[in-house]
Amino acid sequence: MKQEKGFSKRVPKSRKWIADLLHASKQVPSIAFEKTMNLEELINVRKLSTPHVPWTIIFLKATAILSSRHPILRQSYLSFPWERIYQHPHVVTSLAIEREFEGEPAVFFAKFKEPQNQSMQELAARLTKLRTEPVEQFGEFRRLIRNTRWPRWLRKLLWGYLLHGSGAMKSKMAGTFSISVTAAEGASAINVPNVTTYCLNYAPFAADGTIRVRLHFDHRVIDGSPVARLMAELETILHTEIVAELRAIAESS
C-alpha cells in the first residue's frame, strides 16, 4: 500500500507575527497572580441595558482607571544601553482581537489610548469596528502585516530594540497594559505570553457570579504584594465606578 506524503506550505503572515511575539515574550520574566472576584451585582446591572456592554470593554475600562491612578502600571524595565525604569505619561491598552486574514485565523492587537476618559459605549463602538471592518483600515493592523515583509533577523532586531531600548516606542507599539481573553469561548489561558509589563486575562464566569481574574506582570518592575493590592482595588472599581456607569447607560436607554 502506497504511503501518503505530507506537504509544506508558506508560513502565513499571521503566524509570523505571532512567532515574533512569542520569541520576544521570552525576554520578559512574567509571573501571574489570580484573584477570584464576585461580580454578581455587576452581572445583573449589565443585563439592564441593550445591547450589553462586552465584558472585554468592562475590564478594559476598569484596568485603565486603575492604571491612570497608579503610575507603576505604566512602567517598563529597559536594559539598553543602561538599566532603567521608564514611565509612560498616559495609559495605552493593547487588546488582542481575533480576525480572519487572507483565509487564515489571525490575532491582531488594537490600541486604546486613555480609555479611562471614554465611555464604555464609545469603547464598545470602536471594538465593533475593529472586529468587523476591513483589517487594512486600522494602522496598528497594517503595521503588523507590513512588518512580516522584513527578514526574520531584522524583525528580531527591531523587537529587541522595542523591548530594551525605547520605553516610549514600546508603550506606543505594544501598550502599557494588555488584555488577552478567550472566556467567551468557554476556556482561558493559564499562561499568556506577552511583551507588556502587565497583561490581564480571566476565566469564564461560574454559576454563582464569581470569576477568576489573572494579572501577569514583569517581576523586575513590581513585587507580588503590590499586585495583590492592585487586584483588590480593581475589584472595587468594578463594583463602584463600572457599576455606576452601567446603571447610567441602562437609565438612558
Image: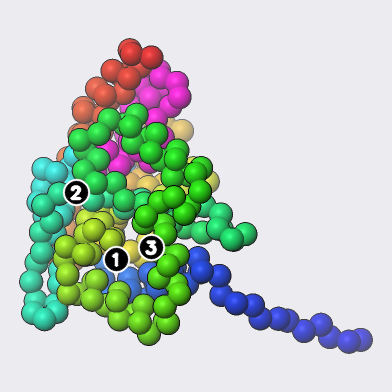
Between 167 and 203, the residue placed more toward the observer is 167
* Residue 91 marker: 2
Mark-to-mark CA distance, 3 and 2:
20 Å
Residue 205 visible in the shown view: no
Please tell me in which quadrant of the rendered image residue 115 appears. Answer: top left
Local crowd size for mark 3, using a 10 Å CA cut-off: few (<14), some (14–19), many (≥20): few
- Which is nearer the N-term, disc 3 or disc 1? 3
**Secondary element at image label 1:** loop
The image shows residue 27 at horizontal and vertical percentages of: 27, 75
Q: Across the whole image, how many numbered discs are drawn on residues? A: 3
Mark-to-mark CA distance, 3 and 1:
17 Å
- The reply to whether the C-beta atoms of the residues labelled 3 and 2 are less than 8 Å apart is no
Local crowd size for mark 1, using a 10 Å CA cut-off: few (<14), some (14–19), many (≥20): many
Q: Nearer the viewer, mark 2 or mark 1?
A: 2
Left or right position of 196 against 148: left
Q: Nearer the viewer, mark 3 or mark 2?
A: 3
The image shows residue 216 at horizontal and vertical percentages of: 28, 58
Mark 1 residue type: Val
Q: Is residue 57 magenta?
A: yes
Mark 3 residue type: Arg
Q: Please report the residue visible at 31 percent of the width from the left and 51 percent of the height from the top.
A: 111
Q: Which residue is mark 3?
A: 143
Residue at the far front in the pictured view: 137
